[in-house]
Image (tube, rainbow, N blue to C red):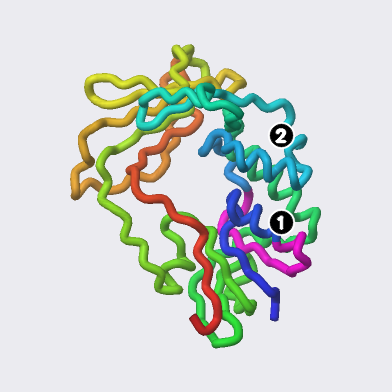
Amino acid sequence: MDASVIVVGAGPAGLMLAGELRLGGVDVTVLEQLPARTGESRGLGFTARTMEVFDQRGILPAFGAIETSTQGHFGGRPVDFGVLEGAHYGVKAVPQSKTESVLEEWALRLGADLRRSHTVRALTDKGDHVVVEAEGPDGPQRLTARYVVGCDGGRSTVRKAAGFDFPGTSATREMFLADIRGCEITPRPIGETVPLGMVMSAPLGDGIDRIMSASGAPPPADAPRRPRTRRSPPRGSASPARTSRTRNRCGSAPSATRPGR
């Protein structure tokens, strides 16, 4: 066996799982197709329960000074958690890139084996173990493990290879997101409803603001899905640090395949 557990995906879920497995004395290998962390902000902040877990694991101080907020929203409708006695509040304005950096250092310190530039192509259930076929920097590889866990996102290769259903629901609205540098924007951290949908904006620090807009109209059924883009702005204009277009759909928890199931 190359490892007791192979985790596919080195995002927050995969790295957190790798660290937890190492705390339990399990040898774990993490396969990640990207050669390095993207450094993109992506998801901002984390929940109160996540903050408690990070504190229990001794890694909360690695995030530096953090700020919690009683304010939240549901589809742009303000929600004040401060009205609940003894309520716990989530952490805001921590970019996912920081979370991934902290979790990666923690997992590696505990002894996790992180292998970047490894793309999983196929899985084979052998009954008492799983064979993982991957493409690495040195070519094709075959790795074996008792368990394989998919933490590789909504289009999970592990989920598809294991035959797990993911029906979800059709998108009901389309959302556009941009992190823009050098453009002063009125903060709307919990969203603001407008006649055609909702807008949000929040400062991320270092002169970068996040803007999100969602239209109430569903996207065209035949509209192609656009990848994240980076465009060079005209000279003297605001600079997009990151832009993306997404469609809301059901989220997914990490998927796992166990021999014989």
Q: Residue at x 28, y 52 (%)?
A: 169
Find residue 38 and report its image quarter: top right
Q: Which residue type does callout 2 highlight? A: Phe
Q: Nearer the viewer, residue 20 or 27?
A: 20
Q: Which mark is residue 63?
A: 2
* 177 falls in the magenta region: no
Q: Is residue 139 left or right of residue 164?
A: right
Q: Quadrant of the N terminus?
A: bottom right
Q: Residue 207: horizontal and vertical position, in percent? A: 57, 18
Q: Nearer the viewer, residue 52 or 123?
A: 52
Vertical placement of residue 125 versus 218, above or below: below
Find residue 129 and report its image quarter: bottom right
Residue 2 shows up from this direction? yes
Q: Which residue type does callout 1 highlight? A: Gly
The part of the chain drawn in magenta is 21-36
Q: How dense is the environment of label 2, judged by Cα within 10 Å: few (below 14), some, or many (20 and up)?
A: few
Q: Residue 147: horizontal and vertical position, in percent? A: 60, 74
Helix, strand or loop at label 2? It is: helix
Q: CA distance from mark 1 to mark 2?
A: 17 Å
Residue 209 shows up from this direction? no
Q: Is residue 69 left or right of residue 112?
A: left
Q: Nearer the viewer, residue 24 or 189?
A: 24
Helix, strand or loop at label 1? It is: helix
Vertical placement of residue 38 versus 162, above or below: above
